[in-house]
Amino acid sequence: MKNSKASVSNVPFPYRHDRENTGGRVSGMDTWLVHKFLHAIGGPALRVVLWEGQEIVPPATTPAVTMTIRDRGALWRLLLNPLLYFGDDYATGRIEIEGGMVAFMETVYRAMSRTSRYRRVSDPAAYRRNQPALNSLLGSRQNIHHHYDIGNDFYRLWLDAEMVYTCAYFPDPSASLEEAQIAKMDLVCRKLRLQAGQTVVEAGCGWGALARHMARYYGVKVRAYNISHEQIVYAQERAKAEGLAGQIAYLEDDYRNIAGECDAFVSVGMVEHVGPDHYRDLGKVIDRSLKQRGLGLIHTIGQDIAAPMSPWFLKRIFPGSYPPTLGEMMAVFEPGGFTVLDVENLRLHYAKTVEHWLERFEENRHQVTEMFDERFVRAWRLYLSGCIANFNLGTLQLFQVVFSRSANNLVPLTRSHLAPGGKS
């Protein structure tokens, strides 16, 4: 959504307010401002409770979600910049939500999409206006450190046993998170048609699960790159303990420094941190690495409309992040003459993945509080809930794109190899 401010222009009051059992008095100016704020964000079916107990609710409805504003300052901050200050004030307890954070965010996002001020409009240049550091070599390291190096023990509380922090794949809706992450890694390997003895380059390897899966079950050798020190150390220790160190080299280095040829190039969950200004750089890396008959796969969060992430998300959770459109991704492929062979959208799989993460996160929230503090817990609850809402509503997508060199005719004629046990 665009980084806009709620309007308080003179509009009709579509909401009623109930003065019964308020427990105190709220000024007429306060209720007026709430009315204007709700109108500005599209009139969501939302109950608002002010700091002295006064309720403001939509007429002729019984809202399923409630937002309680604890003080006048929080109300003013919502008016100034809701896409930034809502997150900060929820994290500090100045705003409370009842009825479920995912339901609340879906309710508000749907309403906002109906307004001209918040309707998503393609604006690729907004990426640069909203990313002060962008994704230079130094900036990328700082951005990744902000999110990924906050402690393996934290992520271990709510990720699967293999520590996979990307979209899972649920061939059966009842599959566990562990089963779905293994299914995702196997799907990636089948799409790449991996064969024993091949060499693979992985750009952005996380905690190393995919490299271990490829080496163990497909007999390939992997060079995996990542600039998160915490993740690389963990991956190296796991590979050594599992007897895979001879097949995998985990390198603490930027994707722009990848060297050497490979039969397959794969990147799962990294392109979100590359940024449109560097898509051609990534394409050059692939061009100098991928053999003439090689295959590549990019797995990334994406979107249908080029628009920046919210300012709160960029400031507090994922600095430097940007989910590309499929059109923008072509800047990776076009300069090197690569052909797109297959595109699959796993959006609903990602919504289900984050539902599992959020459930585990909440089960371990007391431990997370001890590691950090209550504000951190609330901020990450908001982040994970927002992800679910955005994937459910289609604001965010999850693209898996398979590609090769344009003259490569050793490519699948059908998609039969994608079935479990399928032949390549």
Image (cartoon, rainbow, N blue to C red):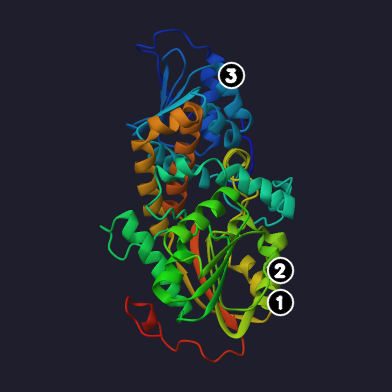
Q: Do the residues labelled 2 and 1 touch (CB within 8 Å)?
A: yes
Nearest to the eye among marks 2 and 3: give it. 2
List the residue tagged with mark 2: 280
Label 3 vs 1, first from the N-terminus: 3
Query: In the picture provided, is 320 more to the left or to the right than 57?
Result: right
Q: Which of 234 and 262 is in front in this view?
A: 234
List the residue tagged with mark 1: 335
Label 2 vs 3, first from the N-terminus: 3
Real-space CA distance between mark 3 and mark 1, rounded to the nearest whole angstrom = 51 Å
Amino acid type, mark 3 = Gly
Assess disc 2: are there few (<14), some (14-19) or many (≥20) residues with their C-alpha within 10 Å of its C-alpha.
some
Label 2 vs 1, first from the N-terminus: 2
| 90 over 186 or under it: above or below | above
Q: Position of residue 338 (x, y in %)?
A: 63, 80
Q: Position of residue 397 (x, y in %)?
A: 49, 59
Write the residue at 44% across / 33% down: 368
Nearest to the eye among marks 3 and 1: give it. 1
Query: In the picture provided, is 246 more to the left or to the right than 190?
Result: right
Q: Position of residue 304 (x, y in %)?
A: 55, 61
The secondary element bearing badge 3 is classed as helix
